[in-house]
Amino acid sequence: MLTTKAMEANDGKPLPLYQKALCGLTAGAIGACFGSPADLALIRMQADATLSAAQRRNYSNAFHALYRIVGVEGVLALWKGAGPTVVQAMALNMGMLASYDQSVEFIKDSLGLGEAATVVGASAVSGFFASACSLPFDYVKTQIQKRQPDAGGKYPYTDPKCSVMQMTWIFLNQIQKIEKRIGL
């Protein structure tokens, strides 16, 4: 839908790569805002199995996890980690959607391959870029969502050693500060 509207504004011509990337970023942000509670429940349920028996939350299913999160932590807690989730989804969609459209154009125009080969080739390129763009953010997002404070009330993962992780961490910390300011 965003791509179609952008193409209409571009006189029906294919969009340049940066516009495709912006459409992907926007779609990822919108989708992640709605999907963040389900993602939180999934991460919490997966993390539960790795905890000691005393620390487990013992969710029986996703709906139970959502119900307990609201009951114990409040409704806004459903969007804990939403900032990193949104950033990860934006990166994923940008990498996937922009590279797919660009690959289809390249394969059709430059290589002249048939429909099936175009779809397979563009999908492979798209999958690679989606993974490459989103996996660093996905790792950090998962660590944020599943963490629990230690006995002193301090959260882990506040001093990453890797320079790439430090850059990602700084960016995501800024998003968390914004979330705190608005009450999430």
Image (tube, rainbow, N blue to C red):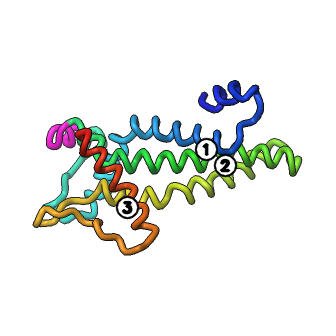
How far apart are the alpha carbons under marks 2 and 3?
Answer: 26 Å
| In the displayed structure image, the side of residue 30 where residue 51 appears, left or right | left
Q: Does 76 sit above or below residue 166?
A: above
Residue 136: mark in rendering: none
Residue that carries the numbered disc 3 in the rendered image: 169
Front residue of this view, candidates 122 and 153: 153
Q: At 22% from the left edge and 37% from the top edge, which residue is drawn?
A: 67
| In the displayed structure image, the side of residue 49 where residue 55 appears, left or right | left
Q: Does 60 sit above or below residue 31?
A: below
- Disc 2 packing (10 Å; few <14; some 14–19; many ≥20): many
How far apart are the alpha carbons under marks 2 and 1?
Answer: 8 Å
Residue 172 visible in the picture: yes
Total marks shown come to: 3
Residue that carries the numbered disc 2 in the rendered image: 99
Residue that carries the numbered disc 1 in the rendered image: 21
Q: Which residue lies furthest to the bottom in this view?
A: 161
Q: Give the x, y percent position of residue 72.
A: 14, 42
- Disc 3 packing (10 Å; few <14; some 14–19; many ≥20): many
Q: Does 68 sit above or below residue 120?
A: above
Q: Give the x, y percent position of residue 57.
A: 19, 52
Task: Give the mark nearest the N terminus, 2 or 1.
Answer: 1
Q: Quadrant of residue 75?
A: top left
Q: Does 162 sit above or below residue 19?
A: below
Q: What's drawn in magenta, residue-wise?
A: 66-74
Task: Give the mark nearest the N terminus, 2 or 3.
Answer: 2
Residue 64 visible in the picture: no
Q: Contact, CB < 8 Å: mark 2 with mark 3?
A: no
Amino acid type, residue under disc 2 in the picture: Ser
| SS for dot 2 | helix
Tag in front: 2 or 1: 1
Q: Is residue 72 on the magenta stretch? A: yes
